[in-house]
Image (cartoon, helix red, strand yellow):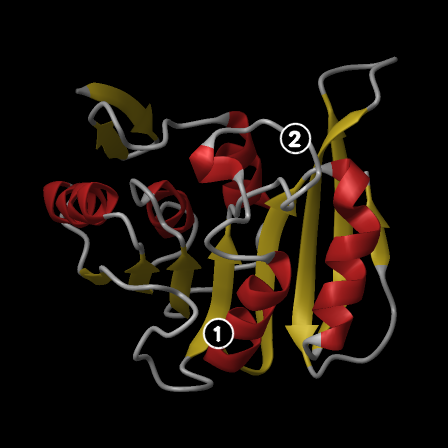
Amino acid sequence: MKTEQLGPYTLSWPEGVFPLGGDALALGEFATVRPRWRVCDLGTGSGVLLLLLARRAEGLSLTGVELDPLSARTARSNLERNGLAGEILPADLRSVPLPAGAFDLVVSNPPYFSLGSGGSGGPTRSEEHCALEELCAAAARLVRNGGRFALCHRPERLTDVVCTLRASGLEPKRLKLVSHGPGHPPALLLVEGVRQGRPGLTIEE
């Protein structure tokens, strides 16, 4: 079992659960969140994004959706161990039985590699079980009008991400490209869309 301190919370995960990485940490700081918002993490893994958001805003209603049984149990344990009320649903995000428009914020650290792309990210990083279009459709259904969907992805998928968000009714409003340092090309893409938002995209430093 590995552990990591995230502010006031402790994240733990066993072998076989996707480990903590810089992408999740960056998304946890990037996503817009307000006190008492209803938050849903699609493909929550260990529940790390729920902990990262809970340390930024008080009174959040936390929900995680996770297909893998071990990861779902881990996420549930992480909420309980840190004294956070929440619900972890061991379900497929494409058909999860949650009401439409139930959330103010949906977040996801999704699989990066499309089928047939030649990318090798392992089974947890392949879109074999959930394509980008399916993820955005699920987020669009779950978030309220005016609510937000924030995700991280690979910079080379920028066109795919922005076009798919708009096609799903999630207007891209904030975008950030993150590199490992000066002189390095971007290694991470962060995007946030607003359900039925007006056109107009802010590129952040």
Residues 12 and 160: in front is 160
10 Å crowding of disc 1: few (<14), some (14-19), many (20+)? many
Q: Position of residue 81 (x, y in %)?
A: 11, 41
Three-letter amino acid code at disc 1?
Answer: Asp
Quarter occupied by residue 170? bottom right
Give the residue at mark 2: 119
Number of disc labels = 2
Query: Is disc 1 in contact with disc 2, using a CB cutoff of under 8 Å?
Result: no
Specify few, some or many for label 2: CA neighbours under 10 Å numbering under 14, 14-19, or 20 or more. few
| Residue 129 horizontal/vertical position (percent) | 46, 53
Where 108 sits versus 170, above or below?
above
Of all residues, the one furthest to the front in this rendering is: 116
Q: Residue at x 61, y 45 (%)?
A: 152
Q: CA distance from mark 1 to mark 2?
A: 33 Å
Task: Check disc 2 and give the amino acid type.
Answer: Gly
Judge by depth and name the residue closer to the eye, 2 or 85. 2
Quadrant assignment, res 147? bottom right
Between 99 and 145, the residue placed more toward the observer is 99
Which mark is first along the chain, 2 or 1? 1
Q: Quadrant of the C terminus?
A: top right
Residue 88: x %, y % from top left: 22, 59
Q: Residue at x 71, y 67 (%)?
A: 165
Element class at badge 2? loop
- Depicted 76 relative to depicted 136: above or below: above
Residue name at image x 26 percent, y 32 percent: 11
201 up-or-down from 168: above or below: above
Indicate left or right for 1 with 11 as reference.
Answer: left
Residue 104 disc label: 1
Mark closer to the observer (1, 2):
2
